[in-house]
Image (tube, helix red, strand yellow):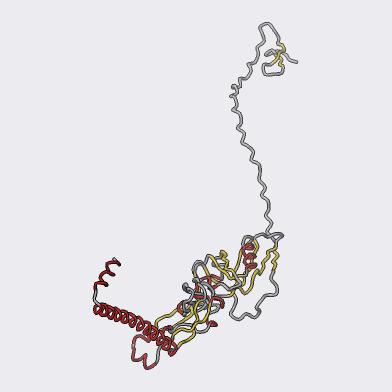
């Protein structure tokens, strides 16, 4: 193919060769010009973009330095700050790491993502029941009843003392021991208080709703907020926040007797009782032993045989020609026959 092209060029006249060379030069020049123009325009656009970024307002925000899983307590080493354009930063973005450290993550935060308020819990209590447990404590549950839990008036968030009444009573002495004092009650049954405050009840003010104009004049509230102090129905379990050693102590004590929750006032005169063991002596009732009389089996008397009818003995008659005589009676004894009308002894 190349030989044919050379043969064709050799057949051209000098004027034709000059025209071909000029056309080829023009085409090459056009390609070079277009390439240089593209490179120049790209360089100019990059320079303009850099100038625009330099002129664009920037602000430092907090981003995740590593992946953060949900419900993880955020530490300082998990965060870093980067400068980003102000128009790309959301309103709830966090600018200072001090506002994040110690708070739990609500959702997964990937490395490089901006940390915003909607990705975090406000407090550890908002993270659920595990967020209600103090860092140095564990949650432990015990069985209770209305009698052992102040008739159900103890509510989550209250402070209680834990008292043990052992089940063994020896020598007429009942012992009680204050196991724990000033303990936080986390839950009763499955009811918890995430805010740590008493449960509030909002009731409508019917008097204020009857007349809207009168309400506007007198500024009557539409609703009234009160503290719910009603007892809990059928309390069956109580969950307490205890240090690990106290939790083990309570669980072992629960196997030896009855646990009582003693409710504390808001402002007790004494924070802790100096005496934790109490004794009560009583005289146990002596039960008189019951004497059991042995039962003699009834003896059935033997059936008596009927006695023959008594037949008086017939007076013996002396044989003819005799004056009497002696003999032996059939029923025992002896007898003597005396002749009738004769003389006797």
Residue 126 on image: x %, y %: 49, 75
Q: Quadrant of residue 86?
A: bottom left
Question: At 60% from the left edge and 76% from the top edge, which residue is drawn?
Answer: 264
Nearer to the camera, 205 or 143:
143
* Number of marks in the rendered image: 0
Return the x and y of residue 279 as percentages of the image width and height.
Answer: 70, 67
Camera sees residue 231: no
Question: Residue 345 or 18: which is nearer the viewer?
Answer: 18
In the picture, the quarter occupied by the N terminus is: bottom left
Residue 342, how many percent across, how many down?
A: 70, 12
Report the side of 64 relative to 9 (left or right).
right
Find the residue positioned furthest to the top: 321
Q: Nearer the viewer, residue 342 or 131?
A: 131
Q: Is residue 321 above or below residue 63?
A: above
Q: Is residue 1 left or right of residue 119?
A: left
Q: Quadrant of residue 184?
A: bottom right
Does 310 sit above or below residue 53? above
For the point 60% across and 81% down, the residue is: 267
Q: Quadrant of the C terminus?
A: top right
Residue depicted at 57% across the width and 65% down the height: 142
Q: Can see residue 210?
A: yes
**Of 106 and 229, which appears nearest the observer?**
106
Seen from this angle, which residue lies furthest bottom? 217
Where is residue 98? Give x, y as percent.
Answer: 55, 82
């Amino acid at each position: 193919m190349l030989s044919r092209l050379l043969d064709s060029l050799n057949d051209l006249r000098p004027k034709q060769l000059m025209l071909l060379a000029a056309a080829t030069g023009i085409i090459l020049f056009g390609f070079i010009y277009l390439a240089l123009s593209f490179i120049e325009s790209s360089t100019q656009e990059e320079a303009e973009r850099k100038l625009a970024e330099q002129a664009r307002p920037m602000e430092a925000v907090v981003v995740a330095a590593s992946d953060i899983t949900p419900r993880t307590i955020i530490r300082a080493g998990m965060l870093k700050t980067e400068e980003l354009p102000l128009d790309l930063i959301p309103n709830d973005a966090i600018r200072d790491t001090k506002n994040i450290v110690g708070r739990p993550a609500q959702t997964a935060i990937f490395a490089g993502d901006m940390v915003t308020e909607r990705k975090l819990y406000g407090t550890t209590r908002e993270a659920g029941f595990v967020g209600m447990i103090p860092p140095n404590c564990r949650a432990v549950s015990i069985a209770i009843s209305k009698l052992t839990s102040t008739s159900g008036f103890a509510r989550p968030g209250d402070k209680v003392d834990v008292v043990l009444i052992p089940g063994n009573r020896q020598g007429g002495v009942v012992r009680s021991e204050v196991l724990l004092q000033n303990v936080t009650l986390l839950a009763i049954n499955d009811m918890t208080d995430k805010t740590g405050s008493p449960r509030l009840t909002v009731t409508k003010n019917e008097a204020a709703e009857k007349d809207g104009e009168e309400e506007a004049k007198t500024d009557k509230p539409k609703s009234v907020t009160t503290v719910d102090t009603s007892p809990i129905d059928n309390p069956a379990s109580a969950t307490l926040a205890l240090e690990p050693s106290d939790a083990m102590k309570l669980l072992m004590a629960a196997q030896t007797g009855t646990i009582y929750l003693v409710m504390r006032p808001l402002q007790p005169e004494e924070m802790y009782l100096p005496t934790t063991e109490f004794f009560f002596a009583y005289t146990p009732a002596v039960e008189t032993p019951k004497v059991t009389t042995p039962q003699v089996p009834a003896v059935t008397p033997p059936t008596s045989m009927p006695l023959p009818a008594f037949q008086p003995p017939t007076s013996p008659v002396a044989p003819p020609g005799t004056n009497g005589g002696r003999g032996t009676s059939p029923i025992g004894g002896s007898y003597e026959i005396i002749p009738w009308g004769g003389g006797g002894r």
